[in-house]
Amino acid sequence: MDPRASALNDFGLALFIGLMSGAYSSIFIASPILSLLKEREPRYVEIRRRLAAYPRRAKSSPGHGGGWSAPGLGPDGGDDDGHGSGPVAVVPVAPSRPTSRPVAVAPAIPLG
């Protein structure tokens, strides 16, 4: 085997390992650290304080109007078998607006 090809293969392997470790670090290490640091900023402390003080909406039971927020979620926000994640904060969401205009459809032209 040509020594240059071997050197390129070794370099390619080192590059691949660096790429994978960098991606892992960015996703699973740097993101949580950034999240922790951002939560300490005054703006986010105020948002968390307001959210904690926000009155929770009474939950209705499934089948009696309202229901839970998604199929398969039980009264505690977890799955239907009672293994939930605990109480869930209800945050009002503004109605969404269409982001694009409707596209006009051209009439069909007979081909014949």
Image (cartoon, rainbow, N blue to C red):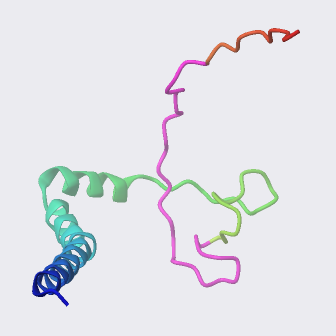
Above or below, 78 relative to 106: below
Q: Which one is in front, 27 or 108?
A: 108
Above or below, 68 relative to 36: above
Q: Is residue 32 left or right of residue 66?
A: left
Q: Residue at x 59, y 75 (%)?
A: 78
x and y percentages locating residue 97 in the rendered image: 52, 27
Above or below, 97 relative to 51: above
Q: Is residue 52 left or right of residue 70?
A: left
Q: Quadrant of residue 21?
A: bottom left
Count of number-bearing discs: 0
x and y percentages locating residue 38 in the rendered image: 17, 60
Question: Residue extending furthest front?
Answer: 2
Q: Is residue 27 left or right of residue 22?
A: right
Question: Residue extending furthest bottom?
Answer: 1
Q: Residue at x 59, y 73 (%)?
A: 76
Confirm whether the magenta stretch covers residue 11. no
Which region of the structure is painted magenta? 76-102
Q: Quadrant of the N terminus?
A: bottom left
Confirm whether the magenta stretch covers residue 86. yes
Q: Residue at x 11, y 81 (%)?
A: 4
Q: Residue at x 61, y 19 (%)?
A: 102
